[in-house]
Image: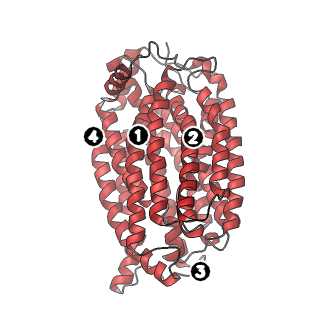
Amino acid sequence: MTQRRASLSSLIFYGIGNLSPAIKGNFLGAPIFYYYNNVLGLDALLVSLALAIALVIDGITDPLIGYFSDYTRTRFGRRHPYIFASIIPGALFYFLLITWQLADSQLGLFFQLLFFITLLRVSWTLYQIPREALGAEISKDYHQRTQLHGLSSLFGWVGGAGIYYATQKYFLKDSYDNFDGYQELALWGSGLILLTGSIFALGTIKDIPHLEPPKKDRPESMHAIWREIKSTLNHKSWLMLFFSGVIFAVFVGLTSGLGFYFNSFFWDWKPSDVAIFAIVDLVAAMLISGFAGPLAQRFDKKNLAVTLFILSILIGPLLLVLRLTDLHLGTQLLPANGAQYGTLWWIMMVHSLVSAAVAVLAWILVGSMTADVVEDSQTQTGRRAEGLFFAGPNLIQKSVSGIGLMIKGILLSVVGFSAEATRLEKIAAVEQLAVAIVIISVILPSLALYLFSKYEITRNRHDANLDQLGYGEGKPTP
């Protein structure tokens, strides 16, 4: 067997496959929490609870889909049957999550959110887990894997930033409370999810004959299945990525979805004022994605990623720190809140650009590092388990991210934010929220970074693994 480098068309179609998860993920970030809380009026604690329960259910299905897809044997390969089965339900439940209103009561809204968000997440587990596993099969080359994940990240940013820009500029316009704007988002978002997911699935069919064959002799008993899963995942470098991800998942659960709150009540922006930030971030992602491969060739992946995450910790909460210093100490470190294209607007745009560039490159490297675990484990266990390695962390990480979501709901309640409060009360509440987020933004990512630094796979070790497994120096498959 020769080491397989992917063709350019395979890289592009794989990248296109990240458009639909990015569109879905954009709504599941800031908009969904704000929409159900401040537009539909569901209490923040109940929003958090529904999203957390859905995350736990989603996390349980992830390793199951990953494990069984490793053993699936069909004429369409191991991964594609799941991908094709997910696209229409994923688009449909995205649309219904936003547009259907089955009840007006708190309990009714809670179960509506829980029902549709759970179905959406499970539908996209069938898509995203096999897709991520497919990436580790399409290319095994140490450097091209970084290019693969860089291109995937680029398309993801096109999808996420594009729908974010359209949401704020054309759908929501002058108010984050624009109900009709969210309905337009539902229509456009679901249509794009259906279109881009189908292009990816159809475009990668040609790769099926060149992918890894299905694993044989799947254990019959649950005890044997669990023993194999445990044996496979007992890998130090993967465990360091896993536990680092667990801590970071709590951080993401805590902080994701707060952008609409800060823009509206802390910085005094209208949606249309900051819509262009998404395009600025997209430009940063496009530029930095092109440098991912060359940088990974020059520097060790882990060392470069660690440096980037340190920068991210320093840069991320910087503007919140400066504004809180102004508010509490009477300084003037930042210009006053003002109109679009004022001094503060430009400062925030540059901050958004730099933050995006650092984060994009760091997560490209993490994806590539996770793929390298596959062959390192294969040399130790004799088994390839792409699906399990990419899905395995999600059970715990999504569960603890749900804990973060619950804490976020508690924080919003503790600081006094509610849909019924006056604007002045909401402003005061979000100022208190900013203090908590600054502290959290330093402590949790720092703990995650410490564990991440224990990853062990180097370029030389990966090349030795490929030689031992007989992959050699292959050429791209047409």
Q: How far apart are marks 2 and 1 (CA)?
A: 14 Å
Return the residue at label 4. 454
Q: Distance between the residues labelled 3 and 4?
A: 46 Å
- Which residue is drawn at the image coordinates 40% and 24% (left, top)? 375
Q: Distance between the residues labelled 1 and 3?
A: 44 Å
Q: Distance between the residues labelled 1 and 4?
A: 22 Å
* Amino acid marked by disc 4: Lys
- Find residue 273 and report its horizontal and vertical position in percent: 62, 72
Of the numbered discs in the image, which one, if any, rests on residue 65? none
Q: Nearer the viewer, mark 3 or mark 2?
A: 2
* Amino acid marked by disc 1: Leu
Question: Is residue 19 shown left or right of residue 446?
Answer: right
Of the numbered discs in the image, which one, if any, rests on residue 339? 3
N-terminal of the pair, mark 3 or mark 4, is: 3
- Which residue lies most toward the bottom here? 330
- Find residue 30 and report its horizontal and vertical position in percent: 53, 61
Q: Nearer the viewer, mark 4 or mark 2?
A: 2
